[in-house]
Image (tube, rainbow, N blue to C red):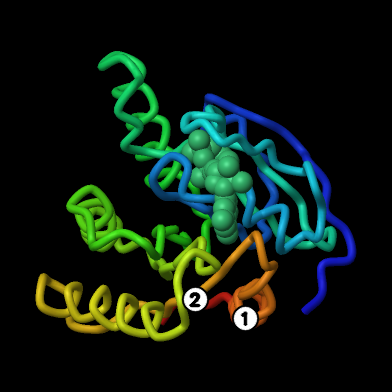
Amino acid sequence: MRVTSSEFIISNTDVSKCPNERIPEYAFIGRSNVGKSSLINTICDRKNLAKTSGRPGKTQLINHFKINKSWYLVDLPGYGYARTSKTSKKAFQKLITTYFEKRKQLVSAFVLIDIRHDPQPIDLEFMEWLGTHYIPFAIVFTKADKEKPKAIERKTQTYIQKMLDHAWEEAPPYFITSSLHRTGGDELLAYINKLNEEFTNQEHLPSFDV
Ligand code: GTP
Ligand code: MG
C-alpha cells in the first residue's frame, strides 16, 4: 500500500469527541520522544503532518490523521516523561487509557520502542495492560539508524525473548524502523493493509445470531 493522501482531521482531549466513523484505526503509543510523530510523518511521506520535537512531551492531545480517505492513524501523547508534574502525568495516563478502553474502531496499537534501550518496565507493563484489555498490538522498534545491523538483530531477539519469558505465550508482530533513514515504513503499511482488508471482510459478514 502507498499513502496517496494524508490529512489532519482533529485534536482532542476528550475521547468521546474523536471521529465517529466506522473505519479502521491504528494508534502509535510509547514513551515520550521515542519517535511516534516522526514515524507518522515518515510513513505518510510528509515533513510536518504530525508535530515533532527534540524535547519530550511534544504531543499532548489525541490527533487523528485520515489516510487514503479510508483509515485513521492516531498520534498519542507519550508516557513516562519524567519532567511533567504528577498531576499532568495522571491526566495523560487517564487520556491514554480512556482512549484504548473506548475506541471500538481501534484495530491495533503500535507500541514504539527505542531500539537502543534494554527492555524497560514501563513499556512491558503497558503492553501487559493492553493484553489484559484484549487490545491487539504490534511492536515498532524505532531509531534503527543508531545501531549496527548485528546489534539490531541481537536487541530485537532479546526483547522478544524477554516478553516470552515474562508473560506472553506468543511474540507480537514487530517492525524495525528509522525515520532518519526512512526505513521500515513499507513493512508497516503492508501489515496495516492486511488488517484493513480483514476489517472490511468482517464488515461484510452477514449479520445473524448464532
Ligand atoms: P512525544 O510527542 O514527546 O511523546 O514524542 P514522539 O514519540 O512523538 O517523538 P518525536 O517524533 O517528536 O521525535 C523525538 C525526537 O527523536 C526528535 O528529535 C526526532 O527527530 C528524533 N527521532 C525520531 N525518529 C527518529 C529516528 O528514526 N532516528 C533518529 N536518529 N532520530 C529520530
Ligand atoms: Mg509526538
Q: Which dot marks residue 92?
A: none
**Earlier along the polypeptide chain: callout 1 or callout 2?**
2
Location of mark 1 (residue):
187
Closer to us: 198 or 118: 118
Q: From the image, tell me which residue sits under label 2.
A: 175
Quarter of the view holding residue 72: bottom right
Residue drawn at the location 31% of the way across and 37% of the way down: 80
Which kind of residue does numbered mark 1 sit on?
Glu
Residue 76, given in percent of the width and then of the height, sits at 52, 41
Find numbered disc 2 in the image and state the secondary structure of the residue it sits on: strand
Q: Nearer the viewer, residue 181 or 18?
A: 181
Label pair 1/2, CB-CB below 8 angstroms: yes
The CB of the residue at mark 2 lies under 8 Å from ligand 1: no
Q: Is residue 173 above or below residue 28?
A: below
User: Does residue 4 sit above or below 35 in this rendering?
Assistant: below
Q: Residue at x 46, y 49 (%)?
A: 34
In the rendered image, the vertical position of residue 11 relative to residue 162, given as above or below: above
**What residue is rendered at 72% in x and 33% in y?**
10
Can you tell which quarter of the image residue 159 is in? bottom left
> Which residue appears at 39% of the width and 59% of the height?
113
The quadrant of the picture occupied by the N terminus is: bottom right
- Residue 39 to residue 163: above or below: above
Q: Is residue 80 left or right of residue 193?
A: left
Q: Quadrant of ligand 2?
A: top right
